[in-house]
Image (tube, grey):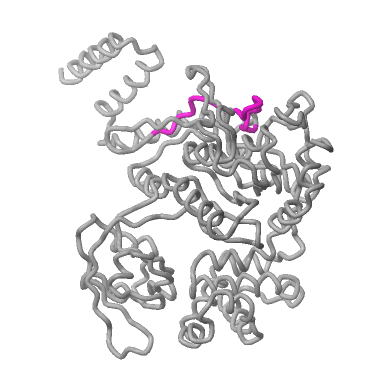
Amino acid sequence: MKRFLIIVAMLATVNAYAQLNMTEEGRKLMLADYAITNLYVDSVDESSIVEAGIRAMIEKLDPHSSYMTPAEVKEMSENLDGNFDGIGIQFTMLRDTAYVLQTISGGPSEKCGIAAGDKIVFINDTLVAGKGMNASDIKNKLRGKRGTTVNLLVKRGGEQSLLPFKITRDQIPLYSVDAAYMVDKRIGYVKISRFAATTFEEFIEEVVRMIRFKRMKSLIIDLQGNGGGYMSAATHIANMLLDKGELIVYTEGRKSPRSEERAADRGLFRDGKLVILVDENSASASEILAGAVQDWDRGVIVGRRTFGKGLVQRPIQMPDGSMIKLTTARYYTPTGRSIQRPYDKGNKAYGMDLIERYNHGEMVSADSIRLDDSLKYYTFKNKRTVYGGGGIMPDCFIPLDTTRYSDFHRDIIAKGVLPRVATDYVEANRKTLTDTYKKEETFIEEFDVDNMLIDALCKAAEKENIAVAEEQLHRSLPLIKLQLKAMIGREIFDSSTFFKITNSANDALQRAIEIISNDEEYNSLLGVKQGK
């Protein structure tokens, strides 16, 4: 009798869904869920079954539609909203202990006296040092609602006892402009790591500062490794670089009519020379900005072909806080090029595309890039040939330099040996370093990674079962020394110091400086006719 009633209820449910104008396939899915929940022999976790069903459906779509759990949604929002509630420190895990790398300027920890080099031993009476906790465990204990307090006991070098701190949590900014400085007397450089809610404000503040106080005339925007983020952040920056009314990007899909973004005003930096650096990991919003600049012949694109992610995801919020990011349209550059690379061979082949590019030789030779003449377009002003079919093709190709890399270098990066050795060195020598190098410029010019530090690196590598092959060490030694110096500099000063040091080996940046410094080459790359 009970089963009969359940079946009657199921039929009633199906009829109810039919009234909602659902497709037959939709009613079928609902009935399957209802049957499993009510008739299956054992009790079931309906939430996990529904989640698995959603994931399976989305896998049949494109590579970028996705399902996110509530925790994943929260983390994504923090990364892109540009802030979170916490105490304002950057830390790393050093032998099971949270080691403070930096305090956020103006944040709660800085105001309370937390300093770089402090080791967090207790959080709210809970021993966290030497307990095998990972960075996520520590982060979750430090974060909390704005206005609440957290009590820390920290170990500081030179102090016999633990130091107590009571810190009131506050809103902490997450910066997306990693570095902004003058690479020479006339050329400014801005490194953008992602396009977040605060990116445009950070960017314009730095550009205005360099124009006003440093007399900047030309600009290099570094989007290498920038996987994207908010489209609006990219279009706001494009608005600074283009003339009023010029098309920045448009979107279009089966159920999404064409929607355009145009420059609203004549850009603040409309006339100076402009170079944008990209690589195979520059994606989405990065490609929107680079594509607009290229199509309007506004600046030179330097680097390697970009990732090719040009699908618009619409977030669909679920009642439990989870989210479906559903592709509803495609991005197109102003000339009509689709940014999205093909995915008709399936998600697995799509995920292997960068490896295929490398194996094919595209990363090291421009001649190996496959160009489809049927996807040929022309820029608006100078009628240069540009190509669609996935990603933005650079105007000036920079090959990936594989000569400086080795298995040894890869392993010490992958196992965290390099940053750990840098942190150990700063911890042991912080006072000497800060006394000797009071100015960043002095550190950059004078500090040298000596043989003792390299010996320490090799010993640390051996402890991680990494073989120290002399030939590989010799090949990667200049790069290892540069990265160690940059990591040490970052701990003493800030993230901008890191890029000022490593950028000496940034081939794309060095080439960009050459291009800007040579009027004839700059104009030639943009297709400017002589006499114009």
Q: Position of residue 445 (x, y in %)?
A: 64, 77
Q: Residue at x 45, y 28 (%)?
A: 57
Q: Is residue 419 above or below residue 311?
A: below
Q: Does the magenta run of residues contain 131?
A: no
Q: Residue at x 52, y 36 (%)?
A: 235
Name the outermost residue toward the left.
Answer: 1
Asked if residue 31 lies left or right of residue 393, the reply is left
Q: Does the magenta run of residues contain 338?
A: yes
Judging depth in this view, the residue of 205 and 401 nearest the camera is 205
Q: Is residue 82 above or below residue 182?
A: above
Q: Is residue 22 visible?
A: yes
Q: Position of residue 40 (x, y in %)?
A: 28, 29
**In which quadrant of the rendered view does residue 421 lie?**
bottom right
**In which quadrant of the rendered view does residue 17 lie?**
top left
Quadrant position of the C terminus in the picture: top right
Judging depth in this view, the residue of 178 and 161 nearest the camera is 178
Q: Is residue 122 above or below residue 392?
A: below
Asked if residue 141 lies left or right of residue 221, the reply is left
Judging depth in this view, the residue of 211 and 8 nearest the camera is 211
Picture mark count? 0
Asked if residue 504 lies left or right of residue 179, the reply is right
Instruction: Tell me where the magenta segment starts and ends, as one range.
Output: 324-341
Q: Position of residue 470 (x, y in %)?
A: 74, 78
Q: Residue at x 59, y 51 (%)?
A: 225
Q: Residue at x 32, y 21 (%)?
A: 30
**In which quadrant of the rendered view does residue 286 lie?**
top right
Q: Is residue 134 visible?
A: no
Q: Is residue 503 above or below residue 270?
A: below
Q: Position of residue 129 (x, y in %)?
A: 33, 75
Quadrant position of the N terminus in the picture: top left
